[in-house]
């Protein structure tokens, strides 16, 4: 469209320098237009409008090749008609959390989205990547067929073998491949990474090392410890990975320092009638200079913690907690925790053990710290420890400790896909109802996928005690009632037959 390029040039130069006149229009419309000039700016807008309409009416639709194929017949049944209507309403209201619930219910029922809703779902898959796996699962053969016809919907790339993806794929695809393979075949994932390591970019090397860290294993050590990288970012990522593998030389060096700093002491107490066991700490222990090249900082930013204590705390955070059981000659994790909690100067290091339990995914220690840790320890580490637990256990412990760290625990529980049990949900909503300024309707829209439908009959029991908060809660409660009612409706819809 030559005339449109001319309009753009006049706009960039400005009408004062380059007035746009009727002579600049295509001859096909300039000769037919009755025109009286008024003002340079006004003339530009009027003539540009005419040119745009000319372009619109004179344009041809894009050429589309004939569709000479049909979708493969579906093997699964379509969802009920009522469920399709529900989904259309949720999409129109932009209730995407409930759209996610709809997709989960559809998958769980072994059903597919009906053809009439597929365009809306495929549009959503383009805009919201987090929903793509579930949309692909319910789109069926017809959905994949439509994706091949419309380039805008091609969110499902053609299947390629792992070697092809690794050699020619985009960075995101390669990282996803390595992460998935790391869970199913860790040894093969390592071989794949080794095959191209020398040619990888700094960004990719760091990303790949972070993926290995998630599933760090002793089998990785020979290769990881042999790497000699010049770049600071890659070197830091290697060091961080090695700090997650119990058998690494870095962890061994940390343990050597801790062995010198902490020692078990036995003596007599209560006029010599009882044996007393305690832990002595030599905070001024010599720390090899090489330790500080591994990310250990020398200076404390907390006035309550000395520099030497801070160094020991960092080292304790980076060794498997089982080390203490062996070094302090204790029968189990509980005995170590009890021993360290005896004295204030040793209790200082317990939060570091909580960090270590989470880092090394030692569930025995995580549970022991939750069950036997004192209030000070739990105040500092409760969310970290809960995050390390499997979902079912996490919710059990969360109900137990909710009053201690309500906001942190609620934020953690929002991250999971699994619904809360009714007792836990009641405790959470009772708390959020009393904190109406912090937890508003946006929160309930986010949380509805976790909240069980059974909570519907309890909403009126959560009225806050403070009069000033009651009007706010009423508004929030109405939204909560609407959202859970929607969830109940979806359950009913998917229980129907076509």
Image (spheres, grey):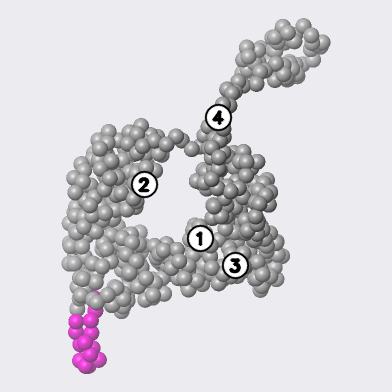
Q: Which residue is mark 1?
A: 418
Residue beneath the point at 28% across and 55% down: 244
Looking at the rendered image, the disc whose residue lies closer to the viewer, 3 or 4, is: 4
Measuring from the top left, give residue 88's x and y in whole percent. Answer: 67, 46
Residue drawn 70% across the image and 16% down it? 58
| Mark 4 crowdedness (10 Å alpha carbons): few <14, some 14-19, many ≥20 | few
Q: Nearer the viewer, mark 4 or mark 2?
A: 4
Reply yes or no: does residue 273 show up in magenta.
yes
Residues 153 and 267: in front is 153
Find the distance from the CA under tag 3 to the CA under tag 2. 36 Å
Depth check: give the residue in front, 247 or 306. 247
Q: Which marked residue is nearer to the observer: mark 3 or mark 2?
A: 2
**Does the segment drawn in magenta span residue 87?**
no
Is residue 10 visible to the viewer in this orientation of the structure? Answer: no
Nearer-N-terminus badge (2/1): 2
According to the image, label 4 marks what residue?
Answer: 69
Reading the chain from its start, which is encountered first: label 3 or label 4?
4
Q: Say the numbered circle drawn on residue 179.
A: 2
- Magenta span: 266-282
């Amino acid at each position: 469209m030559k005339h449109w390029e001319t309009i753009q040039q006049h706009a960039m130069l400005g009408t004062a320098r380059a007035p746009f006149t009727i002579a600049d229009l295509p001859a096909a419309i300039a000769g037919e237009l009755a025109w009286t000039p008024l003002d340079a700016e006004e003339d530009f807008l009027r003539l540009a409008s005419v040119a745009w309409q000319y372009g619109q009416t004179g344009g041809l639709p894009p050429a589309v090749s004939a569709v000479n194929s049909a979708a493969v017949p579906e093997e699964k049944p379509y969802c009920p008609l009522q469920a399709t209507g529900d989904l259309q309403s949720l999409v129109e209201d932009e209730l995407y959390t409930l759209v996610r619930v709809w997709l989960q219910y559809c998958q769980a029922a072994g059903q597919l989205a009906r053809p009439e809703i597929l365009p809306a779902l495929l549009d959503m898959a383009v805009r919201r990547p987090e929903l793509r796996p579930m949309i692909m699962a319910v789109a069926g053969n017809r959905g994949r067929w439509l994706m091949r016809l419309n380039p805008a919907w091609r969110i499902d790339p053609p299947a390629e073998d792992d070697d092809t993806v690794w050699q020619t794929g985009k960075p995101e695809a390669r990282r996803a491949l390595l992460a998935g393979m790391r869970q199913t075949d860790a040894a093969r994932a390592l071989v794949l990474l080794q095959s191209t390591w020398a040619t990888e970019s700094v960004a990719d090397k760091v990303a790949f090392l972070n993926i290995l860290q998630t599933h760090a294993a002793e089998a990785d050590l020979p290769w990881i410890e042999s790497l000699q990288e010049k770049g600071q970012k890659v070197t830091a990522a290697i060091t961080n990975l090695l700090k997650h593998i119990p058998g690494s030389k870095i962890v061994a060096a940390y343990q050597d320092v801790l062995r010198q700093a902490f020692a078990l002491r036995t003596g007599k107490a209560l006029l010599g009638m009882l044996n007393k066991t305690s832990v002595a700490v030599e905070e001024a222990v010599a720390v090899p200079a090489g330790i500080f090249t591994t990310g250990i900082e020398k200076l404390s930013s907390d006035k309550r913690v000395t520099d030497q204590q801070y160094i020991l705390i960092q080292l304790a955070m980076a060794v498997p907690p089982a080390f203490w059981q062996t070094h302090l000659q204790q029968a189990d994790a509980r005995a170590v925790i009890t021993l360290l909690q005896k004295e204030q100067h040793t209790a200082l290091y317990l939060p570091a053990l909580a960090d270590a339990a989470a880092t090394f995914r030692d569930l025995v220690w995580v549970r022991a710290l939750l069950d036997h840790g004192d209030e000070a320890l739990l105040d500092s580490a409760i969310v970290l420890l809960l995050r390390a637990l499997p979902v079912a256990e996490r919710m059990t412990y969360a109900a137990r400790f909710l009053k201690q760290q309500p906001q942190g625990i609620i934020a953690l529980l929002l991250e999971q896909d699994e619904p809360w049990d009714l007792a836990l949900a009641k405790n959470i909503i009772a708390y959020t109802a009393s904190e109406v300024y912090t937890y508003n309707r946006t929160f309930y829209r986010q949380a509805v996928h976790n909240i069980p439908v059974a909570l519907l009959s309890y909403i009126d029991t959560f009225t806050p005690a403070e009069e000033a908060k009651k009007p706010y809660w009423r508004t929030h409660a109405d939204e909560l009632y609407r959202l859970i009612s929607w969830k109940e409706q979806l359950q009913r819809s998917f229980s129907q037959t076509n």
